[in-house]
Image: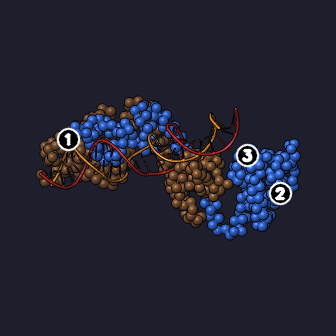
Chain colours: A brown, B blue, C red, D orange
DNA sequence: TTAAACTATCACGTAACGAGAGAGTCAACA
DNA sequence: TGTTGACTCTCTCGTTACGTGATAGTTTAA
């Protein structure tokens, strides 16, 4: 009993194109063909097709199906085990995506309802949060609990005017840094002005200043790619240049 | 501050090719280019890129990102809600696949350890199970509890010899049916022999025979695509032809 | 000035078919 | 016996989000 392609397709509830495709990639070729080139499938072909469709339902890629389809149960079990793990991995990935989506929604939902002032408050909190998340422990270890709590308190206490002054100051810093960078010399006047401006900017969130802490922060900027990205985004190669300027500014290096 | 492509790629931790691609599909084109055709990205471009990458992390297709990227939060929220459902749907799908994989593994694990006899026993159980799952309720309603329990018990009680006799009988039935089908007449001698053979085959699992039950089964074969597929798989259009033959055989239709 | 590092534009490959296009084949009906 | 309708065949493009060369021109640091 040999069948033509549509009959097979209807029995298996798949498309004729799918059978064409399986033939093309050598996954399932009909036992024979008519003189006019029509594909003719045998019983054995049908059974093979059932197997193929079983694995397809399990989300196996056709390539792997082709590999394992004719192997004994033993090997198929191994493939199944491995495949199961891949599916689990995919599911974990989706779970993560869901979490991120929820966060994003919460965030955007918040934003839509906020007044300008609320957005400003939220922005400050986010600044603190980000800082804590990224550097919290490190800074606490280096400079002690008090330093960081003071900093956080200072940020929270900032008025919108203060905050905008701080942003303005940062902008000036970057302008200065860009010009200074063109001199190519971190000891240049412009570069030293930039270092001073950086200190000034810092004081908006630091309660006390020490040369050591200033240098430590500069080194941290260079070592951490997040900071590097942020500074380099403003001025190309700005991070290293600023670090060098600060080193000189704080007198840690001879001029 | 305009950046060349590699700088942007490094900042965003994506490939240059990706930026080329985004330009190609009009998702993110650089603000300007140099005389020699180098792409130059502005700050605004970078911010847009951040947004794009955020949605990309949420597993949005680029096409949708392009649609919603410049819309207000309100619309983005809507898109997020819908997208969330799609992700949930995907996860449910994966859960289903996992269940099927587990079943398949259990099945194959069983098979590998079985002796021929055990496989035979398992095969009989599967036959009963399949039957129950597909027709259990319907048959119970039509023919009563007893009929089906008897049938199941009879199958369980079959020896391997019995079973193979039954399979052999079925084979003969199909041979007969194929020849009969060629006559085109369900009242033909061959067709009537096939109907008789079908009754004989039935008796392997039925404890009592009635013309009504026999006709009922034949109608069920035709009505149910699973049975149709099974019979038509052996003999093209065999189901209907057998049904007609049985109708005549049981005398429900005038010859 | 020369080599290294960048940049640009094709264009093919990937997974699993769907959707035509154009042309030949087969079976039944008038 | 001719015709029609249902099938069949073999291309070939489209889909997603880039990766991976190939080939060639540009910029930049030593």
Q: Is residue A210 left or right of residue A157?
A: left
Q: Are marks 2 and 1 on the same chain?
A: no
Q: Nearer the viewer, residue B34 or B206?
A: B206
Q: Which residue is mark 2?
A: B200
Q: Nearer the viewer, residue B25 or B227?
A: B227
Q: Position of residue B165 (x, y in %)?
A: 78, 63
Q: CA distance from mark 2 to mark 3?
A: 22 Å
Q: Is residue A213 visible?
A: no
Q: Position of residue A222 (x, y in %)?
A: 26, 51
Q: Reading the chain from its start, which is encountered first: label 2 or label 3?
A: 2
Q: Are marks 2 and 3 on the same chain?
A: yes
Instruction: Farthest residue to the bottom: give it.
Output: B115
Q: Nearer the viewer, mark 2 or mark 1?
A: 2
Task: Identify which residue is drawn at 72% across, 68% down.
Answer: B117
Q: Residues within 10 Å of mark 2 (few under 14, many from 20)?
A: some
Q: Residues within 10 Å of mark 3 (few under 14, many from 20)?
A: few
């Amino acid at each position: 009993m040999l069948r033509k392609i549509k009959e097979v397709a209807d029995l298996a509830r798949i498309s004729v194109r799918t059978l064409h495709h399986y033939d093309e990639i050598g996954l399932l070729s009909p036992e024979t063909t008519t003189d006019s080139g029509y594909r003719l499938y045998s019983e054995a072909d049908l059974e093979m097709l059932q197997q193929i469709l079983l694995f397809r339902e399990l989300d196996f890629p056709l390539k792997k199906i082709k590999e394992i389809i004719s192997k004994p149960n033993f090997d198929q079990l191994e493939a199944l085990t491995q495949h199961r793990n891949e599916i689990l991995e995919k599911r974990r990935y989706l779970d993560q995506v869901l979490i991120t989506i929820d966060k994003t929604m919460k965030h955007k939902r918040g934003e839509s309802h906020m007044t300008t002032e609320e957005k400003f408050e939220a922005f400050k909190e986010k600044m603190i949060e980000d800082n804590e998340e990224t550097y919290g422990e490190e800074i606490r270890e280096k400079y002690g609990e008090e330093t960081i709590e003071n900093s956080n308190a200072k940020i929270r206490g900032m008025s919108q005017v203060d905050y905008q002054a701080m942003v303005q100051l940062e902008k000036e810093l970057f302008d200065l840094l860009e010009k200074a960078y063109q001199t190519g010399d971190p000891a240049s006047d412009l570069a030293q002005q930039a270092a001073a401006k950086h200190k000034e900017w810092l004081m908006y969130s630091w309660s006390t200043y020490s040369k050591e802490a200033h240098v430590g922060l500069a080194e941290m900027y260079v070592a951490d790619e997040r900071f590097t990205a942020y500074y380099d985004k403003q001025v190309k190669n700005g991070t290293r240049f600023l670090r060098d300027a600060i080193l000189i500014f704080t007198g840690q290096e001879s001029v």
